[in-house]
Image: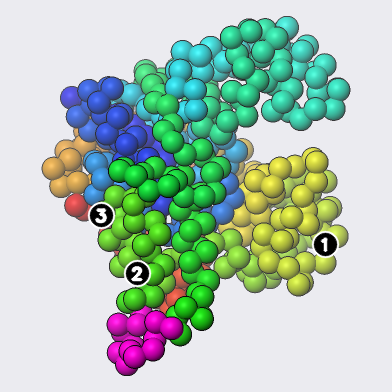
Amino acid sequence: MKTVGLITEYNPFHNGHFYHIQEAKRITGADYVIVVMSGNFVQRGAPAIIDKYSRTDMALACGADMVLELPVCYATASAEFFAMGAVSLLDKLGIVDYLCFGSECGDAKLLKAIAKILIEEPREYRELLNRYLKEGITFPAARGKALKTISPLIEESLLLSPNNILGIEYIKAILSLNSSIKPLTIIRKTADYHEIELTPHSENTISSATAIRKSLLDNTMINYHQFDELKQGRHNVSSIANHKVNLNMNSIKKHIPDSVYEILQNNYRIKFPIQEEDFSLILKYKLMQETKLSLTKYTDITVDMANRIYDLNFQGYTFLQIAQLIKSKQWTLTRINRGLIHLLLNLYSDNFNTYNKIEYTQYARLLGFKKESSHLIRNITKKENIPVITKMADAKEQLSETGLTMLMEDIFAANLYNLVVYEKYGTILKDEYTHGVIIR
């Protein structure tokens, strides 16, 4: 029996993700696919557009055999720690043979060579890196230039592509953990990670998750003039509502599997879309409670950033506008967004540093599985490498004090997300203790 692991966000699931699952099974010959997926908040420092259980259902409908939640402290971390948290979880399961990830270059050997240099940091590399940093260029650019100087085969642009960067971090994590998992990569098809427009329609159209989210969020802003035209001659309110849903959802239909379209359509404007702006008031309330000193307790918020945040007059701004006000040459917008999300979710640096000292992810939180793959749970449990949480009520008996601290962060994040869903759509979602595992 062979098993391939995938590290994902599925925000939301689209045709590219379906291709990834199918191709991962093909190139590895794997019988099963285990997915480690971010929960209700994701790595770019934002809420997921739809909740983790809906995204779990999408993954299982499209070929995954099991979905585990990446703890929120790692799901919202920098690429290095996002990768380490996820790889440590896959490694501790004891049944994963391969890790397959998408990349812009599609060359696992090249990414592994870079990963080794970054882990070992030979003297020549360190000296070049410091020299380029002193010239005033950014760290990613300096790193790429140093690597290019050491090895002409390494293009500087390679380290500016997000999936290449994550792939290198996955391999670094595998090497650092001395894991037996074999890394493999497939080249990204069609859409660029940051592409904001949907790819023109064709068979098996692949667009970026960014473009699909943009389409969903843009369509949420109703064109009332068009809608009034649709209402003419209609007297059935429910039929008008259904027409509006179809009007908004049709733009992405060719870009996602049919099963995913059905899940999204059934939940559209019931519990999604959710975006950063929905957390604006909560963020401002939280900022009112903080001091310059207390802000530095949160992961990714430095003293300099804390000073800049504290001096802001944020009253008339939204979440994203606040992030733009903070932005400077010193920090990327993604870094700032992550800091603000950590502030919102009470994710403290001290806790995070503790997790990193004691082997990272402390448990395997089961979000869903296929009935015919249920034996995977037993196989993981038999290994006794990591507690498997299938019922939240049992977690207290399974976890150490540190593990419980990590889990309580996940629970708080889920509760806050559910609260925003209710305030936006009036929909009450089950909490972590009453929401069962998704079984397909």
- Asked if residue 398 is positioned above or below residue 120 in the image, the reply reads below
Report crowding for label 3: few under 14, some 14 to 19, many 20 or more residues within 10 A (C-alpha).
Answer: some
Mark number for residue 312? 1
Q: Position of residue 82 (x, y in %)?
A: 52, 37
Q: Position of residue 35 (x, y in %)?
A: 34, 39
Answer yes or no: do the residues labelled 1 and 2 have beta carbons within 8 Å? no
How far apart marks 1 and 2 lie (CA) works out to 42 Å
Task: Give the magenta range.
Answer: 229-241
Residue lying at 51% horizontally and 75% vertically, measured from the top left: 223
Report crowding for label 1: few under 14, some 14 to 19, many 20 or more residues within 10 A (C-alpha).
Answer: few
Among the two numbered marks 3 and 2 on one chain, the one whose residue lies closer to the N terminus: 2
Q: Which residue is the site of mark 2?
A: 246
Residue lying at 73% horizontally and 68% vertically, measured from the top left: 317
Helix, strand or loop for the magenta stretch, by majority: helix
- Asked if residue 235 is positioned above or below residue 204 in the image, the reply reads below
Horizontal relation, residue 288 to residue 435: left or right = right
